[in-house]
């Protein structure tokens, strides 16, 4: 069985995708397409106070200290009349398993019949887990949720690198964040 991932954030950038997968870049690896029935939103988070094996944490860029914040990430939510532009790319079974483990704030959901192109296999998208949404709500309620400014700008850049129209489509199908941007430095464990 062949597997495809629909990327709707940073994985729209082919270079980032291949770095993420640990592969050589291929000029025909990504196909831009549409996913029907969803909108992007900023509503899942990690608790920056907690160390998780093989994950990450953030430091404040100004102080170098580890802030007690809930770092917020991009997600998608059902929206019947909405459509998202994103990147479709093929992964093998080993990569799919690896992505499942790495995307610990998300769960994999089948969307094969919701994309506007045909592929010979299953299409998956990663949607935030209820636990990750709960962490976001906790951070929002305590005014401790924020978005890494670097991540926020990088996601926008990923779409604009495909042209002005794709960049504008990203903005139109993305809810504005409810939390501030913050200059953070990502530390991978």
Image: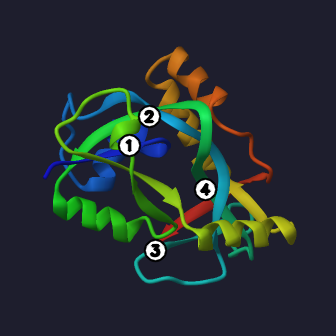
N-term mark: 3 or 1: 1
Residue appearing at x 56%, y 40% in the figure: 38
Q: Which of these two is toward me, 89 or 78?
A: 78
134 left or right, relative to 122: right
CA separation in Å, label 1 and label 4: 17 Å
Nearer to us: label 4 or label 2:
2
Tag 2 or tag 3, which sits nearer the N-term? 3
Closer to the eye: label 3 or 1 = 1
Residue count near mark 3 (Cα–Cα under 10 Å), binned few <14, some 14–19, many ≥20: few
Please tell me which of labels 4 and 2 falls first in the chain. Answer: 4
Residue at the spot of label 1: 6
Mark 2 surroundings: few (<14), some (14-19) or many (≥20) residues within 10 A: many
Residue 3 percent location from the top left of the image: 22, 50
Structural distance between the alpha carbons of marks 3 and 1: 22 Å
Q: Which residue is labeled 3 in the image?
A: 55
Q: Classify 10 Å Cα crowding around label 4: few (below 14), some (14-19), many (20 and above).
A: many
Tell me whether circle 1 and circle 2 mark residues in contact (CB < 8 Å). Answer: yes
Examine the rendered structure and indicate whether residue 106 appears above or below residue 51.
Answer: above
Q: Position of residue 42 (x, y in %)?
A: 67, 51
Instruction: Give the residue at mark 2.
Output: 86
The residue indicated by pointer 4 is 73
Q: Does residue 134 appear to the left or right of 25 in the view shown?
A: right
| Whether residue 170 is situated above or below residue 143 in the rendered picture | above
Q: Earlier in the sequence, mark 4 or mark 3?
A: 3
Q: Where is residue 39 drawn, in percent x and y? A: 60, 39
Q: Are marks 3 and 2 in contact (CB under 8 Å)?
A: no
For the residue pair 27 and 110, the one nearer the viewer reads as 110
In the rendered image, which quarter is residue 6 located in? Answer: top left
Residue 177 x, y percent position in the rendering: 75, 46
At mark 3, the secondary structure is loop
Q: Is residue 154 above or below residue 31?
A: below
Q: Residue at x 80, y 50 (%)?
A: 178
């Amino acid at each position: 069985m062949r597997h495809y991932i629909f990327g709707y954030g940073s994985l729209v950038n082919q270079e980032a995708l291949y770095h993420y997968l640990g592969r050589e870049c291929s000029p025909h690896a990504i196909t831009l397409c549409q996913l029907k029935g969803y909108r992007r939103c900023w509503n899942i988070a990690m608790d920056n106070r907690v160390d998780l094996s093989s994950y990450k944490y953030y430091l404040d860029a100004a102080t170098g200290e580890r802030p007690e914040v809930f770092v917020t990430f991009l997600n998608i939510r059902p929206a019947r009349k909405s459509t998202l532009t994103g990147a479709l790319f093929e992964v093998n079974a080993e990569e799919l398993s690896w992505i499942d483990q790495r995307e610990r704030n998300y769960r994999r959901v089948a969307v094969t019949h919701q994309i506007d192109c045909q592929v010979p296999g299953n299409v998956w998208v990663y949607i935030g887990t209820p636990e990750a949404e709960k962490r976001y709500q906790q951070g929002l309620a305590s005014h401790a949720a924020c978005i890494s400014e670097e991540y926020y700008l990088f996601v926008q850049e990923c779409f604009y690198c495909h042209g002005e129209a794709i960049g504008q489509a990203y903005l139109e199908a993305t809810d504005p964040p409810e939390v501030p941007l913050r200059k953070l430095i990502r530390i991978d464990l």
